[in-house]
Every structure is written in C-alpha cells, then in structure tokens.
Amino acid sequence: MLVDLEDGACQRCGGQLEITDADDVSLDAECTDCGESIHVEIDYFNDGGIKYWPEVMAELESEEEL
C-alpha cells in the first residue's frame, strides 16, 4: 500500500513510501525510489492509526486466505 506523500515521505530522498508489512503495533515501509526501509508505530503517518494500519492488516489477512 502506498503512503500519500502529504502523509509522509522518505526522510532520505523525499520519495514515496510503500507499506510492506504490519503487525499489532507497527508498520514496515520502504521507499519506492531509494529503497530506504523504516519500522514505525502505527500512527506514524499522522492518521491516528485509522487509515493505513487497518487497510494493510486487511490486505495481509486476505493474502493469507489465498
């Protein structure tokens, strides 16, 4: 899932972040430009944990069902 640039960007190059994994308390994201990886709390993208985390968790759950 891609992070809207207005919500957050790579601190290294300013590129777009893609959330690659999640668990109950954190998100993993990677820059689509430079490959920089970050491990952050679920509310890191200033959404209060209600936008990115639930969507990523739902995506991961549906992948497991396949």
Image (cartoon, rainbow, N blue to C red):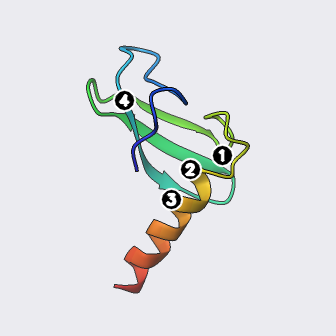
Q: CA distance from mark 4 to mark 1?
A: 17 Å
Callout 4: SS: loop
Q: Is the residue under label 1 in contact with that under label 2 (CB below 8 Å)?
A: yes
Using the image, tell me which numbered label, if any, was put on residue 42: 1
Badge 2 amino acid: Tyr
Q: Name the residue beneath numbered marker 3.
A: 56
Q: Quadrant of the C terminus?
A: bottom left
Using the image, tell me which numbered label, if any, was put on residue 52: 2
Badge 1 amino acid: Ile
Q: Earlier in the sequence, mark 4 or mark 1?
A: 4
Q: Name the residue beneath numbered marker 4.
A: 16
Q: Position of residue 24 (x, y in %)?
A: 67, 60
Q: Is residue 43 above or below residue 61?
A: above
Q: Position of residue 37 (x, y in %)?
A: 41, 33
Badge 4 amino acid: Gln
Q: Earlier in the sequence, mark 3 or mark 4?
A: 4
Q: Position of residue 17 (x, y in %)?
A: 40, 34
Q: Is residue 61 above or below residue 25?
A: below
10 Å neighbourhood of mark 4: few (<14), some, or many (≥20)? many
Q: CA distance from mark 3 to mark 1?
A: 11 Å
